[in-house]
Image (spheres, rainbow, N blue to C red):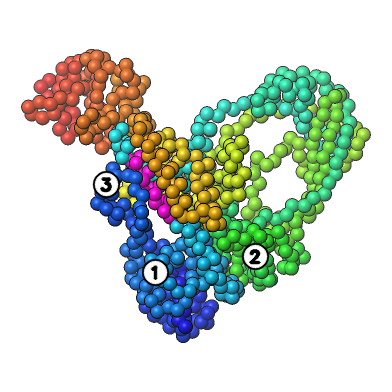
Amino acid sequence: MKRLIIAEKPDMARAFASYLFSDNYTKGNGCLISGDTTITWAFGHMLKNAMPGDYGEEFKSWNTYPIFPKEWLMKVDANCVKQFKVIQELLQSADEVIHGGDPDREGQLLIDEILTYCDYKGPIKRVLANAKDNDSLARAFNNLEDNKKYYNLYQSGLCRSQADWLIGMNLTRLYTHRSKSFGHRESFRVGRVKTPTLALIVQREHEIKNFTSIKHYSLQGTFEQNHLSFNAKHILSETLKQSCDANGYLTDRALLDGLLLKLQDQPAIVKNVNYSEGETEPPLPHSLDTLQVEANSVYGYSPKQVLELTQSLYEKAHVSYPRSDCNYIPTSQHDDASKILGTIRNSIELPSIDSLLDSSQQSKAFNDKKITAHHAIIPTSVLPKSLTSEEKNIYELIALRYLIQFMPPEKWNKVEYTIGIADEEFKGSGKEIVSPGFKIVLAKTKKQDEDEIDSDSTNSILPSLKEGDTPKVSKISVNESKTKPPKRFTEGTLIKAMANIYQFIPKDEPLREKLKELKGIGTPATRDTIIAELLSTNSNGNPCLPLVSKKGKELLPTAWGEQYIKIMDADLTTPLSTAIMESYLAKVESGEYSLHEYINILKEMISSIIKKVESQIFPFPTDYVEGELISCPICKEGQLLKKKAKNENRFFYVCSDPNCHHPVTLKKVFYKDSPKGPVIHLCDACQVVTTACKGPYGDYYHCPSCHANYSAEGNKKKPINK
């Protein structure tokens, strides 16, 4: 029986061959052969959705929409034609196929769409290889499954592909065509995930710009007992709470200054004390998004860079599959722990942890119920060699998160206490680390967020207190604080926001809890690309204005990005509608919805948006010179807006203030359009705006004040007939 294995990429095909054939194979044309088994490979997505023009001449124009294909056309990527023919020929003689795509939605799709396109009818098995080391490959090939089990996953991938095409093609055409009628030059790049992601950045910037800092006040007491000093924070009485603002802040310092007088020279007494012991479990192993967030925070790496580095480690067989949205490990892989831990210890410089490391320990990370199509990103038993410094950093983040699953938790003692002075109360706490446990090895990468620290009430010591104690009152003072604006997104925190999109849905939204179960908008494999596209100055080989810019690590919307979101239909910018579409994809994957039902829902949404946008009045574009609005040279208050001439395919500029007129002619002034913006000519003598005129010897500019004339040749001002 002739068996054909189709891997997603050449490197995985070589890994399959090395494991199955022990490197005892021959190289054929685009394949590796041993006996009756042949291994070939794809180059990722070898098939692409056809362009609108392929569905008919009438769809070549950008003015034509909507485009809803009845039968979807696929085309072989021009760069993959040779290898695709190899796969086609091998399929003709294959008695059985083993689907070797990556263990996720896209991996399922790209091999299944090849088999569908080639009309292969024979039996198909599925191999799910989460890593390239021999232990992982043995587990995968020993557990082959019928590919029919993953039919819904394939349908979900197909839905995602067709949805992105329908939204991208139709709405990009719609907005670009309609916007040109209002003077816009820039093409709109509309995306199912891209647009709401940009909206998050724009909304955050609006929150920052509109933020007003509020001064607020609180009392802090410093106490002493047994030569040990500790703090406690005053708890507002019900009377004082009535004087707080809507956010619960006390903004009138005088109220606390008066309270200080009341507390002066009054004794303190401990009213209640609660001692407790506790422990902190180690964080779970990394998924791609948590790895991207940490690597961005610790090393400043972009999400795209993190994926590329993790992919490189995967291809070198040092870590498992990188495009994972899962933080758990199958229990069947616990037996690999001893070998993997040995590899980590030989790869990373670690403190002395022999007494803390226990390979037989099974943390909460080992949970079969939490496993999706893939598991957490973990190291393999293959010893890393010849890694770049960046690869070493990423490997260490992955390896340490795995290693700490076999270490004890951090253990601590804590005391919480209430101290009374007169009829006022102060509360505080103290915490003492009994045993750092796993945190010994995380010190190098862990950064504590200053926002997590409450220095007013939490002490790094453990005061020894009991009810009835009368500690000395060392000082009671008024603390002044200011509310802080929300922080701009970084690439890392934006990845986290995309993965936890439910947090940006109003709490009273009925679907919020349901959306919490989803994995956010986009996928681990695409979120870095979405962010890169927002920052890009190139679209399909053509220059374009970026929608987002970077200031240090911070992401800011550009002027074009702000305008883009202002124009977009709300259904495209809200995370809610995008997350709902993601929930439909999840239902297709679970079999609750069919491909046909999903696409019909999408078509209805697109048709509704087209109807609304066709009647929408777009704001006229504001052109920018080095990022600044172009001010009117006459009134100095308005901005020059670009408009389209009626019944003519040309544009002009006019002041946004309808009451602005030329100081001499008292007429409305219109400015010619040029590739650099409005053409503004000022008289050398009068410094008033000149008027564009046509004469027998060509165009010229006339000053209505001193009547000087200027040549318009080459856009250079030359006095003539003065």
The percent position of residue 306, horizontal first and vertical second, equals 52, 56
Q: What residue do we see at 33% from left, 57% from top?
A: 50
Residue corresponding to mark 3? 61
Q: Is residue 676 left or right of residue 296?
A: left
- Of the residues under marks 2 and 1, which one precedes in the sequence? 1
Q: Is residue 433 left or right of residue 365?
A: right
Q: What residue do we see at 56% from left, 59% from top?
A: 324
Q: Secondary structure at mark 2?
A: loop
Q: Is residue 535 above or below residue 626?
A: below
Distance from disc 2 to disc 3, alpha carbons, whole Å, reads: 52 Å
Residue corresponding to mark 1? 119
In the drawing, what numbered circle is on residue 330?
2
Q: What residue do we see at 45% from left, 57% from top?
A: 158
| Amino acid tagged 1 | Asp
Q: Could one spot residue 476 in this view of the protein?
A: yes
Q: Secondary structure at mark 3?
A: loop
Q: Nearer the viewer, residue 134 or 633?
A: 134
Q: Is residue 555 above or below residue 367?
A: above
Distance from disc 2 to disc 1, alpha carbons, whole Å, reads: 35 Å
Q: Could one spot residue 524 in this view of the protein?
A: no
The percent position of residue 486, horizontal first and vertical second, equals 57, 36
Callout 1 crowding tier (Cα within 10 Å): few <14, some 14–19, many ≥20: few
Magenta residues (range): 159-176
| Amino acid tagged 2 | Pro
Q: Nearer the viewer, residue 2 or 468?
A: 2
Closer to viewer: mark 2 or mark 3: 3
Q: Secondary structure at mark 1?
A: loop
Q: Is residue 486 above or below residue 449?
A: above
